[in-house]
Image: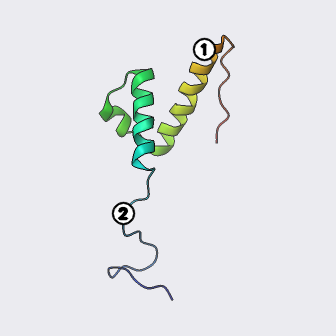
Amino acid sequence: MRTNLHGRRGRWWPGGIATVGTDRLWEEIGFLAYYVHWSFDAIVDLTHDVRRRLLKQVSALNRAESDGSEYESPKRG
């Protein structure tokens, strides 16, 4: 049987919600702020999955522009 932490039953993470590491988050914020010129608050308010999808899209656009190739949308997933 599982030991209850702080009187809670089932799954519970002592540190709160599991997220990306702070270093990785700052890299993502810097990247999006640089390329799409959004505010810090606008980027931080994005959910993790939306932010990751935007990172892929912006990266693909940037790569296509820098090597002169045609933009091809990254596959989802």
Residue 7 placed where, x, y %? 33, 82
| Front residue (pair 34, 42) | 34
- Say which mark, if any, is on residue 66: 1
Q: Quadrant of the C terminus?
A: top right
Residue lying at 38% horizontally and 34% vertically, measured from the top left: 43
Residue 15 placed where, x, y %? 36, 65
Q: CA distance from mark 2 to mark 1?
A: 41 Å
Which amino acid is tagged 1? Ser
Residue lying at 36% horizontally and 63% vertically, measured from the top left: 16
Q: Say left or right for 42 vs 61.
A: left
Mark 2, residue position = 16
Q: Residue furthest top?
A: 68
Label whose residue precedes the other's in the sequence (2 or 1): 2
Residue lying at 49% horizontally and 39% vertically, measured from the top left: 50
Q: Secondary structure at mark 2?
A: loop
* Mark 2–mark 1 CB contact (< 8 Å): no
Q: Say left or right for 40 vs 67.
A: left
Residue lying at 45% horizontally and 29% vertically, measured from the top left: 31
Sort mark 1 into few (<14), some (14-19) or many (20+) by Cα contacts within 10 Å.
few
Q: Say left or right for 69 vs 51.
A: right
